[in-house]
Amino acid sequence: MKKSKNETNREEARELHYNKGLMIEKLASRYCKSTRTIYRWLNNNYQEKTPDQQKIKKKYKWTRKYPPEVFTQIIELKKELPQRSAPIVWKLLQKEFPNNKPSLSTIPKYIRDKRHTYKNNNRRQGYIKFERSKPNDLWQIDIAGVQTVGHLEKLYLIALLDDFSRFIVVVEYFKNQKGISIKSEKQS
């Protein structure tokens, strides 16, 4: 694999500094870089390392300790009213535990972990599928607003739907939305 010019300069600078004893200031003037850049080049972070030499970054997780009553109260509030959102639970906790309450981002995570999320089962209640029981002469017209198509300028996409089958029977672009052009299209 071909190395970039910057990588070769770094390796060369390391070689000159460690093996030939060239000072950092001289390296900086040689490569037209600042001394800070040369220090960075000499740092081990830029060297290619084998997997066993690489440092493994430790992730520190600083968790705050809250009394168990706080979390039991969160669950109780959620069971009392499942639609209650995390910000509302947080405000209610603020009243009961003013000094020792979890952050607003912790509460939804805890609720999710304990599987107390609210799912509305009656979302679609009130919606019914509209369909005629027998074929008829009813048509539905759907007009997709103004569309600008190159040299044709403003056009209206108009579709005729059969009320019984809900299939699109005719789709065409028209220059206006007037019913005359639509009626002529339906008859043909």
Image: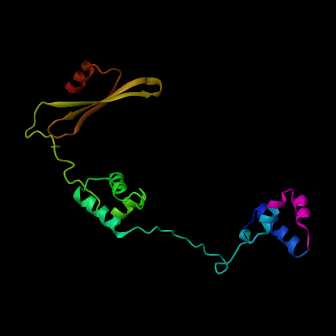
Task: Name the spot of residue 154 as percent of width and height, x first.
Answer: 41, 23
Left-right relation of 36 to 172: right
Residue under the image location 25 percent in, 25 percent down: 185
Task: Name the spot of residue 162 as percent of width and height, x first.
Answer: 18, 35
Magenta part, dominant SS: helix
Residue under the image location 47 percent in, 27 percent down: 150
Left-right relation of 170 to 9: left
Task: Name the spot of residue 7 as percent of width and height, x first.
Answer: 77, 65
Left-right relation of 162 to 21: left
Q: Which residues are magenta?
A: 21-36
Residue 40, relative to residue 81: is it above or below?
below
Residue under the image location 88 percent in, 76 percent down: 19
Left-right relation of 23 to 107: right
**Front-most of 11 and 97?**
97
**Image quadrant assignment for residue 176:** top left
**Front-most of 38 and 182?**
38
